[in-house]
Image (spheres, grey):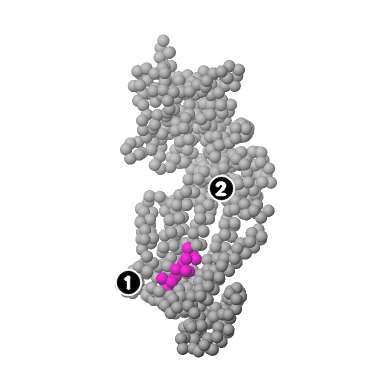
Amino acid sequence: MSDHLLEIKNLKITVATRRNVLNLVDNLTLAVKKGEILGLVGESGAGKSMTGSAIIGLIEKPVKISGGEIWFKGKRIDQHPDEVRGHEISMIFQDPMMSLNPLWRIGDQLIEVITTHMNISHQDAIKKAKHCLVEVGIDPSRMNAYPHTFSGGMRQRVVIALALAPNPSLVIADEPTTALDVSIQAQILDLLKQICKTRGTSIILITHDMAVISQTTDRVCVMYSGRLAEIGITKEIMAHPQHPYTKGLVASTPQIDASSFEKMLYQIPGSMPALDNIPSGCAFHPRCEHAHDKCRAERPEVLSNRAACWLLDANEGQ
Amino acid sequence: MLIIILRRLFQALLVLLLVALISFLIFRYVGNPVENLLGQEATVAQRAALEEALGLNDPIHEQYVQFVWRAIQFDFGNSYRGALPVADLIASRLPATLELALTSAIFAMVFGVLTGIYTAIHRGSFLTNLILSTSLIGVSLPTFLIGVLLIWFFSVELGWLPSFGRGEVVDLGWWNTGFLTASGLKSLILPSITLGLYQMTLIMRLTRAEMLEVMRQDYIKLARALGLSPRQVYFSHAIPNIMIPVITIAGLQLGSVVAFAIITETVFQWPGVGLLFINAVYFVDIPVMSAYLLLVGFVFVIINLIVDLTYLAIDPRLRDSQLKQEQ
C-alpha cells in the first residue's frame, strides 16, 4: 500500500434519472504508483473521464459518488477533494483551444495558479512562471501574450505548464492530445512524459487511442461500461491481452508492417450498451464470441487474474 | 489604438448627422413653421418677411447646414408655446431626467448583475426560484402599471413615499439636483424602480444565462481543476467573460431608460424632458420635438461609443482583430 500514490476502492458513480439510477462507474478498484503513467482506456461513455473527475472532486450534481473510497498519500480524499486539488492533483483537458481564459495573459494565469498554491512573493511567482514556460518549450518573452495568439499545440503546452506549476504528485490528463494535429500529439505526449519522469510525477492518461497507450504508459487499465475489464503492465497487455474486449481493442489498432496492408482492420461487433440497459452478468457478453451461461448470469471481477473474465477461470480449471 | 478611437468617433459623428437630418426634416416639414409662429391672421407681407428671416427660402441643403450649425451651438429655435428658447427649456428639464435615468440605470445594473450571478451560482435554491419567479412580474407588467401600483401601495396605503414630483431641489446654478435633500432622494425611489425594473430583470436574465453558459466552458473546468478557489473562479475567470454581452445590453438599456423616461415621468409628473416632450406632442410644438429627438439620438450614440470602447478594453481578441483591420 505504501508505494501506492493513489488508491481507488470500489468506486461507484451514479446519476439519478427520473426513472432509475444509472451506474456511470461501477465498482472500480485501481491504484497508481508513484512516478508511473497509468493509461485509462475505453470507448466513449466507459466512465474514464468520470473517474478522472471523481479523483479531483469535480463531479457535479446530479452525478454523484455513491460508493467506494479514494485514498491519496494515505489520506482519504473523496470527502474533501479541495484539499488536494491543484497543488497535489491536477488535471488537463481535451481541448486546449477552450482551456485558457481568453481575457487573461498567459503569464497572469500562471502567476495566479502559482500564488494560489505557493507562499511566494509576486516577483518570485513571475520568475517561477517564466521557468514553467521554458520547461514546456515556450519562449518566456511570451508571458504577456493572450491565449488567442497561440496555436493549439502551444496552448496545450501552456495548459501543461499551468497544471505542473504547483508541482503536483499526480496529473490526470483527459484526452490531452485528441484535439491536436497528429504530428503535434507525439510532441505533447513526450513533453508531458519527460517532465513527469524527471519530477517523479504520476500521470493518469485517459484516452481511447491504443496507440497512445502503448507508446506512453507503464500500466494500462481497460474500462468497459463503467467497469474494470483488465488491468496490467502495458507491454504485457498489448502483447497478450486476456479479456476478449482488450483483445478486440488491440486487434483493431492499425499495425504498420508488411502483412497488415492486406488485412482488414478488426472490428469489435456491436457497440457498448446504453447506461440504462447494461446486460446482466458480464457487461461485454452480448459482444463476446466466447460467452457462455456463467457470463450471462454472474458478474466477473478482477481478482486472481488481471482481467475480469470468466473464461480465464475456466481455462485455469482445465 | 488612437486610430480606432478616432474612427469610432468619426462613425458616431456620421450617425449624429443622420439623426440631425431626420430631426431637421421634422422641424422643417411637419406643419408649417410660419403659420405656427404667426397664426392664421398674418398678412402675406408678414409671412414673406418671416420666411426670409427664418431662411426658409434658402436651398434645402443650406438650411440643413444652418440647422446643424445652430444645433452645435445649442440653438434649437424658440418653442411655439411660450416662445422660450428650446435650449433653455431642455436645459432646465435635463437634470431631472438625467438624475432619474442615472439612478434607475444604476439600480438596474447593480441589482440585475448581482441577482443574475447569484441565481446562476446557486441554481435551484429557494431564493433563486423566488427571484426568478418574481422577475417575471418585472418583465410582463407594463411600466405605467408598475408605477401606479407602487404609488397605490407606498404612497396611498403606507404613505411612506411621495407620489409625484421631485421634492425639494437644490439649485447649483447650472444644474438643479434632488440628490442633496431628503425629500429629493425619497421622491427618486418610486420613479427609479418603475423605470429600472424592466431593465433590471432583463439584465438579470441575461447575466444568468451568460453565467450558466460560461460556467460550462473548459477554462472554468481547468481553473477549478487547478485548485483555484470558487471566488477566484467566479470573479476572475467567469464574470469578466460575461461582461461583453451584459455591457452591450445594459448600455443599450441605459439609452432606452433616457428615451422611455417619458412614461414614468408622466405617471409621476416628474419635471423632466420626457414630460416636456409629451406636452410638446399635445401642442404640436415642433422645435421641442425635434430637439428632443436630437438629444435622445445623441445619448444613444454616446452610449454606443462608450460600449464599443469598453469591448476593446475587455477583450484582447477584439483589440487584435481591430488592429489588424487598420493595417
Q: Is residue B226 above or below residue B34?
A: above
Instruction: Judge left or right: residue B31 versus residue B314.
Output: left
Q: Which three-letter amino acid code belongs to the residue tagged 1?
A: Trp
Specify start and end residues of the magenta stretch as a single range: B253-265
Q: Which three-letter amino acid code belongs to the residue tagged 2?
A: Asn
The residue at 55%/65% (across/down) is B301
Residue B276 occupies quadrant: bottom left
Q: Position of residue A197 (x, y in %)?
A: 61, 31
Crowd band around label 2 with a 10 angstrom C-alpha radius: few (<14), some (14–19), many (20+):
many
Residue A306 makes an appearance in the image: no
Classify mark 2: helix, strand or loop: loop
Q: Main secondary structure of the magenta part?
A: helix
Chain ID of residue with mark 2: A
Q: Residue furthest left?
A: B157
Residue A298 occupies quadrant: top left
Per the rendering, the mark at residue A101 is 2
Chain ID of residue with mark 1: B
The residue at 46%/55% (across/down) is B207
Per the rendering, the mark at residue B152 is 1
Crowd band around label 1 with a 10 angstrom C-alpha radius: few (<14), some (14–19), many (20+):
some
| B258 in the magenta segment | yes
The residue at 46%/32% (across/down) is A44
Q: Is residue B186 above or below residue A255?
A: below
Check the picture and name the quadrant holding the N terminus of chain B: bottom right
The residue at 35%/36% (across/down) is A21
